[in-house]
Every structure is written in C-alpha cells, then in structure tokens.
Image: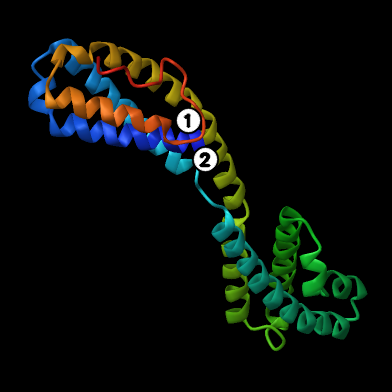
Amino acid sequence: MIKRHEDFISMLTVVGSVFDNHKTVWNTNSVFAGYVTNFNAKRLLIDAAAQGGEITTTGATQDKINAAEAAFEFGSKLSKRASVYALEQDNTEMHDQMRVSKGSLSQLADSKASIKLHDLYNRMVAAGEGLSPYVSPEELTQFKTLIDAYDKLLSRPRELTVNRKVHNEDLPELIQASRKLLYKLDSLINLFDGTEFEAAYLNARRIVNSGSRKAPASEEAPSAN
C-alpha cells in the first residue's frame, strides 16, 4: 500500500474514534448523522480492501512446492520399481512410460506435471495384481493422495494474486468516495461550533497531513476559525 493511502486510512481511524466518542452530540442532527453512517460504511469497505491488498502468496507458493516435491519424489520411487516390472513383461513401451524421474517432473509446467503424475498412476493401476510385488496397493493409494494434494494447490497462488489485485484496484475508488464524504462533513462540522466534538474532529482531520504529501484542498481539515 502506498504511503498516502496509509496516512488517509490512519486519519479515517482517528475520525471514526471521534464519532464513536461523541455520538450523543452529532446524533442530534439527522443530516450529519446520516453522513456519519455513510462514513462508517465506507470505512469498513476501505479496511477490507486494505487488508485484501496486503495478501501474500509466499505461503501458498511454498505449500505448492512442498506438495510437488512429495508427489514427485514418491512417484519417481514407484516408477523405478514399476519400470522393472515392465521389463519383466518384455514391454519396452511400458518401461519408457513408467520410468519417470523427480528431476524430469520438476522441469515440467505445473499442469503438465499433474498430467504426467496421473498418467503414471493410471498405468500402474492398469497393470493390475501383477504389479503388487513391485508396488503395493497401499503405496498406490498413498501416491494418489499425494497427487490430489498437489492438484488442490496448483492454482492457489494465482487465486491469491488475483484477489490482491482486485482489492488494490478497489482501494483508490473507495478512498476517493470517502474524500467527497469528508468534504461534506468538514463543511457541516460548524453545526457543533465551540463544542469539544468539533475540536476533536478538526484535530483528527489534520492527521491526513502527517505525510510528506500536501493534501488537496478538499482533503485538508477546515480552519477552526
């Protein structure tokens, strides 16, 4: 998130606290109260977008890598034994299809690696009971479990990336809408001229200028005079 957005959201948090602490004051005016309700609703949307914009894909990517390594390593181990079974059947084609190394699987794109794992598994299942002295049914079940776990994680990092992108695109629009709303609240705050609520609101609004960027005129806190 960029610095000016962080500053703006920080200011919204403080202004929101002022509204919470002085509800008995501003709630006496229906027009102002309506704007405060809108302010609170937009704050919730902004907070959600800001949090979504900070989504990281590191964990999901590592989970996918771990699942891939487990499936590749176990699959290559079984493939060595299965390829020996194929040689015993004098089936060179079967041998070549079943002989898969962890390294070769790692070189494939995710979707192609998944296809190759499923192909290897299906060929072993199709070999039937004759394969059991080389690869047990329990090992085949374990292999399928590892493949399924890998498949579930294939698209997760991309899903998170897309989700983060959507939130980052929404945030500027939500902030702009809040600026327009604050302009109205700034103009109406003198309804409570001389009150502690007005002073607290004006102080909270000035927080937006804490960064190096000077706020636009519609974003600056109005003068207390």
Q: Is residue 1 above or below residue 41?
A: below
Please tell me which of labels 1 and 2 falls first in the chain. Answer: 2
Q: Residue at x 59, y 51 (%)?
A: 157
Place residue 128 in its image quadrant: bottom right
Relative depth, front residue between 111 and 87: 111
Give the secondary structure at mark 1: helix
Q: Residue at x 22, y 16 (%)?
A: 189
Please state which of the two labelled residues, at mark 1 or mark 2, is closer to the viewer.
2
Q: Tell me: residue 194, above or below residue 150.
A: above
Residue 216 image point, x, y percent: 47, 19
Q: Is residue 5 above or below residue 185?
A: below
Q: As rendered, which of 181 and 108 lies closer to the eye?
A: 181
Contact flag, marks 1 and 2 (Cβ < 8 Å): yes
- Which residue is drawn at the image coordinates 32% and 27% (left, top)? 205
Residue 171 marker? 1
> Can you say which quadrant of the picture contains the C terminus?
top left
- Label 1 is placed on what type of residue? Leu
Mark 2 highlights which residue?
A: 1
Query: Residue at the location (41% across, 15% down)?
Result: 218
